[in-house]
Amino acid sequence: MGAAGRGADRRAARVQQSRSSSSASPELSEERPAEMVKMTKSKTFQAYLPNCHRTYSCIHCRAHLANHDELISKSFQGSQGRAYLFNSVVNVGCGPAEERVLLTGLHAVADIYCENCKTTLGWKYEHAFESSQKYKEGKFIIELAHMIKDNGWE
Ligand SMILES: [Zn+2]
């Protein structure tokens, strides 16, 4: 009889404990700022993601040239075949702009080259005179013949 009574006491004590921990929940909500710090950390990590994403590199020296996310169009034609239009590129130098009449009209374009191995890769549209071609201004063409796909391509 005495032992059973003690067991009941223990059970009651346990209920008491769980009650006191549930009453501590307002304290938990006060700890939320700590969770927000964690979220900020993972956000910082995401900024590194593009680096391990699909990229295009110089076929001659493997310098990174562009992120796949920056690709605008694959339907361009260069002097050596297919060429891609990119929003932005890296490790690329730019020659002097000159006016050229292309299939799509008069443009001011500048040759671009790999800053690492100095190979001419394509060109940059500095200015388009036809309003329908304005979207190309400030964008870069790299010929497929000078690019190799790097990182994360299946
Ligand atoms: Zn290169």
Image: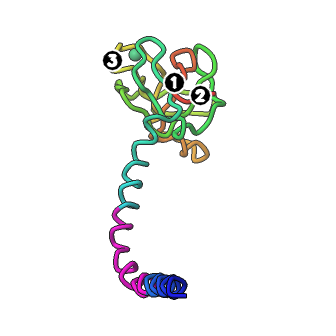
Residue denoted by label 2: 153
Q: Is residue 25 magenta?
A: yes
Q: Residue at x 33, y 64 (%)?
A: 37
Tag 2 secondary structure? loop
Q: Residue furthest right?
A: 75
Q: Is residue 136 above or below residue 20?
A: above
Q: Label 1, label 3: how many angstroms apart (C-alpha)?
A: 17 Å
Task: Classify the position of the N terminus by image quarter.
Answer: bottom right
Residue denoted by label 1: 150
Q: Which contiguous range is marked in magenta?
A: 20-37
Q: How is the image coloured?
A: rainbow
Across and down, in percent, residue 82 comes to 63, 21
**Image quarter of residue 23:** bottom left
Q: Nearer the viewer, residue 19 or 70?
A: 19
Q: Label 3, label 2: how many angstroms apart (C-alpha)?
A: 24 Å
Across and down, in percent, residue 69 comes to 53, 40
* Mark 3 within 8 Å of ligand 1, using the beta carbon: yes
Instruction: Identify the mark at residue 116; answer none if there is no mark.
Output: 3
* Mark 2 within 8 Å of ligand 1, using the beta carbon: no
82 lies left or right of 128: right
Tag 3 secondary structure? loop
